Image (tube, helix red, strand yellow):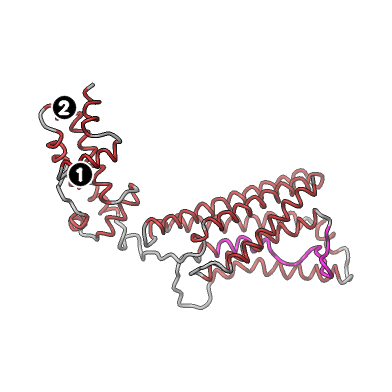
Amino acid sequence: MRTVIAILVFFGAIQGFALCILACFKKKDNTKAFLFYLLFLFSLSFFNLLYAFMLLDIYEIGFVPLGAFPFPYKYLIGVGFYGYIKNQVAQERSSKFNIEYLLFAPAVFYGVLRTYWYVTLHSGADKDIFWRVYQSGFFIYNEYVYLLFNLILTLLAIQFLKKNKTRIKGFNVRRKNWEWLLRFSNAFKLIIFINLVLAVMVHIVGDTKNGIVYAILLIINSIYIYWVGYESLTKSKFLFNTFSLKETEVAEGHLDQTLAAQFEALVNDKEIFTHKNLRISDLAEMLNTTDKAVSLYIHESFGLSFSAYINQLRIEKVKTLLHRGEQERYTLLAIAEKAGFSSKSSFNAVFKKVMGVTPTQYKTSQQS
């Protein structure tokens, strides 16, 4: 069983490294996001590779001993992920130094510490140095520290995605890309949370069940790497984009709360949609804003284009009139015109598309 788990974990790591190489050949317009993505995936894969070797009782490759290898991969996973998400957005900076690079500080500090221990151990200067560090409880608490560090960075990345969702310039395709990033981030958040729970379990059960818990952890990490591989191959166009954000929440393409209230009043109170040949520019002029602002508001609020939204309102108006018994006084065409439709053909086509039946069939069903 141990060998089977080791092979599963090993091939998960190999797939991760293969994806890193494959990504280098993919078309990308965001080099910075790409580099952070490589750091994230390489570090996560290195995590699995090192533990796969341990499960297979492989402790050196050639003249390089693997025991206590000093690469601080655990602290680089979260930094790579956070940098990947944040750098999906084009950011203009007056300074060449990005303060977020300070997030590398824990990895640098831990890397230096591990390097000292590694050299001390394998040079023969102190063969018990890792054992003494282990007995001090350092490694147990270090698990909590790096997992919490990665979890915080992931939560900040998710907060960034949610906060700026309505500020993305562009429509359907760009928003699908952004929503994919959010799903990708939530999946990683779940992985870290499970890792944290397992770390607590290791602390509780002690060394006797340590190997079992770590095996579960490595399998979960491998499944995530396999999933990342699938997503990378099937949705590669989502990986390295450069999004642009509007300056403020009231910038072009977004209605503030006051304008939104005016919009609702025009629709619900004045039933502006009953005006024949209503154009988006007419509505924008009434609200003293732009066509794009109105279009984006409708898309964000209702998930529809302007024409689809107006037609849906008109269909609801027709249904309301029919339920009131207006069909006894007016023809269907007259009711359709009262709702804002300009012709019988467009009314029939829209009604059938929205309701799945013709207006006549719907009217008959209401009378029976």
Q: Position of residue 201 (x, y in %)?
A: 72, 45
Image position of 53 with respect to 2: above or below: below
Magenta stretch encompasses residue 74:
yes
Q: Amino acid at mark 1?
A: Ser
Q: Residue furthest front?
A: 345
Count of marks, rendered view: 2
Q: Residue furthest top?
A: 368
Secondary element at image label 1: helix
Q: Residue 147 at x, y = what percent?
A: 65, 55
Residues at circles 2 and 1 in contact by the CB criterion of under 8 Å: no
The residue sitting at 10% across, 29% down in the picture is 329
Dot 2 or dot 1, earlier in sequence: 2
Asked if residue 62 is among those painted magenta in the image, a careful observer would answer: yes
Number of other residues with Cα within 10 Å of mark 1, as a class: few under 14, some 14 to 19, many 20 or more: few
Q: Nearer the viewer, mark 2 or mark 1?
A: 1
Q: Is residue 263 above or below residue 243?
A: above
Q: Amino acid at mark 2?
A: Gly
x then y, percent, for residue 37: 58, 64
Q: Which residue is mark 1?
A: 346
Q: Quadrant of the C terminus?
A: top left
Relative to 287, 126 lies left or right: right
In this rendering, would 217 be left or right of 310?
right
Q: Quadrant of the N terminus?
A: top right
* Residues at marks 2 and 1, CA–CA distance in whole angstroms: 23 Å
Dot 2, crowdedness within 10 Å: few (<14), some or many (≥20)?
few
x and y, in percent, of residue 112 in the image = 73, 71
Region of the chain picked out in magenta, as a range: 58-83
The residue wearing badge 2 is 325
- Give the camera-side residue of 42 and 95: 42
Observer-nearest residue: 294 or 305? Answer: 305
